[in-house]
Image (cartoon, grey):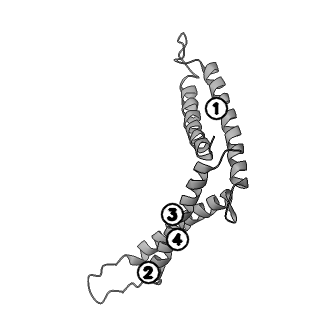
Amino acid sequence: MKLAEALQERADLNVKIEQLRERLETNTLVQEGEDPAEDPEVLLIELDECIDRLELLMASINKTNNLTVDGHESLTQLIAKRDSLKIRIRAYRDIISSASSAPSRARFSEIKILSTVNVRSLQQKLDLMSKALRETDNRIQALNWTTELL
């Protein structure tokens, strides 16, 4: 199984586990004399099986990410790099948006508001970070589809 397939299965299991939790919640109490729509014991068995499979997948994915190397970086390092770039890009976009907003003045005698940062410079940095994010994400996706799950 390729790493990408394991990641897809992990996502599917997370959705299924949440759905099973919801189904269990709706079937744990019934009016006296009524039967639940689904047997909670059967749902619990299915829930436990899904969680057991998820645990195995997560361990295998983490092991594979740690041992898969592209250049001088492990897949784990690339994922951390991608995630930190996303956080940094979001922060820079917010700063640029705030600094770029032009406050309105009704009269010339009102207080003038000026930007304290160089928006053009920040935008250039943002563009470089966005490019790095795309390149890093492409490397991760390529590794996911070419690496066998350990």
* Horizontal side, residue 29 vs residue 53: left or right: left
What residue is at 54 percent from the left and 17 percent from the top?
A: 36
Q: Secondary structure at mark 4?
A: helix
Q: In terms of sequence position, does the residue under pointer 1 or pointer 4 come before the other?
A: 1
Quadrant where the N terminus sits is top right
Amino acid at circle 1? Cys
Q: Secondary structure at mark 3?
A: helix
Residues packed near mark 3 inside 10 Å, few (<14), some (14 to 19) or many (20 plus): some
* Horizontal side, residue 142 vs residue 150: left or right: left
What residue is at 32 percent from the left and 86 percent from the top?
A: 110
What residue is at 54 percent from the left and 9 percent from the top?
A: 33
Q: In terms of sequence position, does the residue under pointer 2 or pointer 3 come before the other?
A: 2
- The residue singled out by tag 1 in the image is 50
Q: CA distance from mark 1 to mark 4?
A: 38 Å
Q: Secondary structure at mark 2?
A: helix
Q: In this picture, is 110 found above or below 149?
A: below
Percent of width and height locating residue 105: 29, 82
- The residue singled out by tag 4 in the image is 129
Amino acid at circle 3? Arg
Q: CA distance from mark 4 to mark 2?
A: 15 Å
User: Which residue is most to the left?
Assistant: 106
Amino acid at circle 2? Val
Camera-near label (4 vs 2) is 4
Residues packed near mark 1 inside 10 Å, few (<14), some (14 to 19) or many (20 plus): some
- The residue singled out by tag 2 in the image is 119
Q: CA distance from mark 2 to mark 3?
A: 22 Å
- The residue singled out by tag 3 in the image is 134
User: Which residue is most to the front?
Assistant: 146
Amino acid at circle 4? Met
Camera-near label (3 vs 4) is 3
Percent of width and height locating residue 21: 58, 31
